[in-house]
Amino acid sequence: MKSIKAKKGSFGYAYGRAYVIDKDINITKQNVTDIDSELKRLDAAVKNVDSNLKKAKSNADEETAPIIDAQIAMLYDKSFLEEVRRMINDEAVCGEYAVSEIGRSLAEQFEEMDNSYLNVRSADIRGISERLCRQLMGKDEEIIPDTPSVVCAYELTPELVSTIDKTNIKAFVSQKGTKTSHVSILCGNYGIPYLFGVDLFGEGIETGVELAVDTEKATLYIEPTDEIKKRIDESATQKCMQEEADLGDSVKICANIGSVKEAEAAAEAGADGIGLFRTEFLYMGAQLPTEEEQFEVYKAVATAMSGKTVIIRTMDIGADKKSPCVKLSPQDNPALGKRAIRICLEERDLFKNQLRAILRAANYGDVKIMYPMITSVAEIERINEILQEAINELEAENVAYSVPSQGVMIETPSAALLSDQLAAKVDFFSIGTNDLTQYTLAVDRMAEELDDYFDTHSEAVMRLIKMVVKNAHAAGIWVGICGELGGDEWAVPRLLEMGIDELSVSPSKINRVKALVADVMKSDTQDEAKLGTEIMCAPADGKVIRMSEIPDPAFSGGMLGKCMGIIPDNGNVYAPCDGEVYMIAETKHAIGIMSDYGNDVLIHVGIDTVSLGGKGFDVLVSENDRVTKGMLIMKIDRDVIRAANLSDMIITVVKEK
């Protein structure tokens, strides 16, 4: 057995026989004598691919259909198809060779452009080129594994993932990819695990070789042992269990959707509501959707959720979502340009048309409205002006409507920093962690070469989230997460500690996230119980670390007693209980308190900080002093502690009487 470290595109565990796509096509340069016949063969292949794609689109949901539309458009793109014809004419070569060469050349051109949103188009070109080559070679329908398989490719395309027969597909693996690509999102929506960053052909992976995928460990196993397969089975059973976890009123687990079909899937999966309905997919046709068309879709989603909350996000066109019916001038950096609410505020009639449809649909359920890409309070005020116009018009026309609650997406650092002011203007927040991470770290999330810099667990992002939650709750509004972080096993416990009220993920992840949240709640309850029945306050401001996660076996193993840690926000240390100081360590890093309940409570500052000999510690109490809960008993110099490469975690240890 061999294990290979990879990168996680979408969550899951699986094993099966490798089905290698890229090695199935062996195209060589062949000259033809009858050019007219070769051009007719090309035309027939284009027609067949067009027919197959349209058939796939007829069975696709409203989120996948635009991806297929983009493939059909690429099939007829002049820069592609006319160049293929020219090459056949000028060089008298076979169609598949011309398609392969022109497709490769165009893809490389897009990859070299100084614009990551055009770079992404290279995958579309490769996808349609490969499909057309397969058709010319009589292999277009071959990608249908007849046994449980792990499909492997140098680069997966959205077209392939959305149209391939998934009956026997257990996982996807590719060499190229990014964690926030459309392929990763589609695989997550389909509930299929996906790993990327694997040198498939360098590792000599051939069709038929048994593979196992563990995305939690971000590892691909070649010829896995029975023990590995057993662990994969157990993990898949545990994490993908279908029974719903009972979370009570603690936190809502909602669904991100892009269609009525997905709303039905969310309802079936037991979602507590729709946390994000992406409406931009209604704008992917050649014509703008009418108010009536939008109303019918929004009404259908509200009806499908049977009274549960449905949050409709106004269109988020721009950046990586191009719309053929919303014309935008070329932009050097669309992510920082005219997109989302910026388009809506400039195209008032287009925006008002959507608002009217949402207002009308709000009569049929608990519909809420949410605005993306907010950066200022002034934008909310301009939105409210247009919303009021829509209300006045419906009133004058005697059309039934309801005014829904309003929220904003927090996906820019400016929105996070102004969240105290924004909270006074709206009814809820939803944090879009994908864009918030991109803008905070100044890393283009679509750029594959920057993937290692796109840190979804960034401390900077987590601090912004914590700030947003604090400001939201201070204003009496709730806050949710609708980015990929909402289903991240590392992040969920930390988000719950911050007080997040809602997590919204794809329908296929609902049960897994519910189970994860239930596990965290159970663990938290157990940890609280371990500290005994005495009610104590935190000895510092900061992030709570459970006993099992403290990086010192003397504490995590319970050798000194039952404990919890805090990573402090500042240098203040407080008494966690009422009592009497009975001990102060010679090196000043620890204080012992005998609580009024008779429990021995130790406040231990840092790990291995005894080596500092008291440097960086200022104890403000003396032995035999009386202390009260919340009283400042010590100040620490965190810079001194960290300069010595030591942890400044503040640990509370309790030995019950």
Image: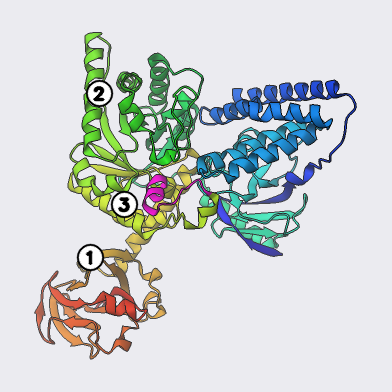
Please state the extent of the stretch shown in magenta in the rendering: 434-447
Q: Classify residue 185 as left or right of residue 439.
A: right
Above or below for 366 versus 182: above
Residue 106 in view of the camera = yes
Q: At label 3, which amino acid type do we have?
A: Ile
Q: Quadrant of the C terminus?
A: bottom left
Assign a secondary structure to mark 1: loop
Question: Where's residue 642, x and y in %?
Answer: 32, 76
Is 445 included in the stretch rendered in magenta? Answer: yes
Say which label, 3 or 1, has the lower sequence index: 3
Q: At label 2, which amino acid type do we have?
A: Leu
Residue linked to disc 2: 387
Looking at the rendered image, the disc whose residue lies closer to the viewer, 3 or 1, is 3
Assign a secondary structure to mark 2: helix
Residue at 31%, 83% (x, y): give it.
Answer: 609
**Residue 541 image label:** 1
Q: How crowded is the residue under tag 2: few (<14 C-alpha within 10 Å), some, or many (20+)? A: some
Q: Do labels 3 and 1 touch, CB within 8 Å? A: no
Residue linked to disc 3: 465
Question: Where's residue 350, x and y in %?
Answer: 36, 20
Looking at the rendered image, the disc whose residue lies closer to the viewer, 1 or 2, is 2
